[in-house]
Amino acid sequence: MNYEEIKRHFENNPPPEIVEWTGWAKITDTRLFLKSCYIGIRNFNGPIDRCPAWWHLRDFYILMKKSALQSPTEETQAEEASLKTSIEESAHLASVEKEVTV
């Protein structure tokens, strides 16, 4: 993936405004972060693989792709947990009602 493809990706799929990148790095304005990466890459004189802005952009893209893949899984797990809880509550209520009617 090159710079233009990543830029197009973020234009079509904007990231959240605030991203906790690591425990010590938090991006509070992702649009500004991306803009500074694009400017840094455009103004860099040398091979792109030696450009720090390129590596930041690439790593951020990978992080967003990973979090996009993990988010549906986490949502599914949360839904399953709430369903399991409601089923357990229903079973408990049924057993309590049975005890009360006996």
Image (cartoon, rainbow, N blue to C red):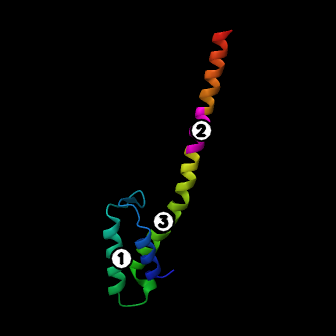
Magenta stretch, overall SS: helix
Quarter of the figure with residue 83? top right
Q: Which residue is mark 1?
A: 37
- First reached walking from the N terminus: tag 1 or tag 3: 1
Q: Marks 2 and 1: in contact by CB < 8 Å? A: no
Tell me the CA gap for discs 1 and 2: 43 Å
Element type at marker 3?
Answer: helix
| Mark 1 Cα shell of 10 Å, populated few (<14), some (14-19), many (≥20) | many
Kind of residue sitting beneath label 1: Cys
Residue drawn 66% across and 19% down?
95
Q: Which residue is mark 2?
A: 83
Image vertical order of residue 82 relative to residue 8, above or below: above
Q: Which residue is mark 3?
A: 63
Which residue occupies the foreground of this view, 98 or 73? 98
Which residue occupies the foreground of this view, 33 or 4? 4
Which portion, as a residue range, is magenta?
A: 79-86
Kind of residue sitting beneath label 3: Leu
Residue drawn 45% across and 76% down?
6
Q: Which residue is situated farthest in the right direction here? A: 102
Image vertical order of residue 14 relative to residue 81, above or below: below
Q: Position of residue 27 (x, y in %)?
A: 35, 62
Kind of residue sitting beneath label 2: Leu
